Amino acid sequence: MNMMNSEIDPNAPRKSWLGLLAKSPAAEIARLWTAYDTHPDHSILRAPEIGGVMVRGRAGAVGAAFNLGEMSVTRASVKLGCGTVGHGYVQGRSKDHALQTALIDALMQTEAATQVEAAILAPLRKARDTAKATRAAKAAATKVDFFTMVRGED
């Protein structure tokens, strides 16, 4: 995470972990959550519910916005016994993924943040970075360097 972002936006760390949780595979979050083995006292503010959002795009990232299509999302909100509220919005239709994301979000705002970071977020971040490096290596292997040779006329 860039320290400049957190100086400009005080919510940058939370945006970072919520983005990581939303983009991580549901099965991997479930595995790490089970291994973390905590059962925080909480109430469900918004039960996991499935809906849709419109995905918008821009041609060349600068053109006029257009509707690309719809995407399924699942959201949930929880409130820990201490009063901390957590939210989870994830792509797809996994209610468990959304609920676990909301619980992790809430825990990351408490004293348990260090343990949650080490047990859940750090492994997810490492897996994401490894996958990104693997994709980059595959792309680099197909890269073609074009060059022009200057030919002299004798």
Image: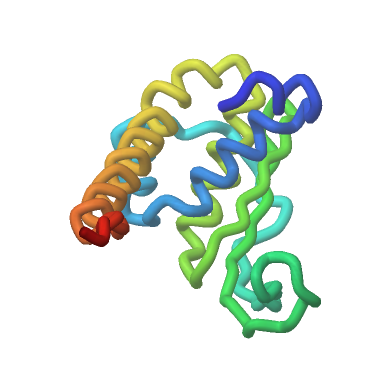
Q: Nearer the viewer, residue 96 or 149?
A: 149
The correct choice, above or below, for 80 with respect to 102 in the image is above
Quadrant location of residue 72?
bottom right
Q: Is residue 124 left or right of residue 46?
A: left
Q: Residue furthest front?
A: 154
- Give x and y (percent) for residue 54: 70, 78
Look at the image and tell me whether residue 145 can be seen: no
Quadrant location of residue 138?
bottom left
- Give x and y (percent) for residue 102: 59, 45
Q: Nearer the viewer, residue 45 or 132?
A: 132
Look at the image and tell me whether residue 16 can be seen: yes
- Give x and y (percent) for residue 66: 74, 82
Q: Quadrant of the C terminus?
A: bottom left
Q: Is residue 39 left or right of residue 129?
A: right
Q: Nearer the viewer, residue 144 or 118?
A: 144
- Which residue is rendered at x = 47% and y = 56% of the image? 97
Q: Is residue 85 left or right of residue 118?
A: right
Quadrant location of residue 143?
bottom left
The correct choice, above or below, for 63 with respect to 42 in the image is below
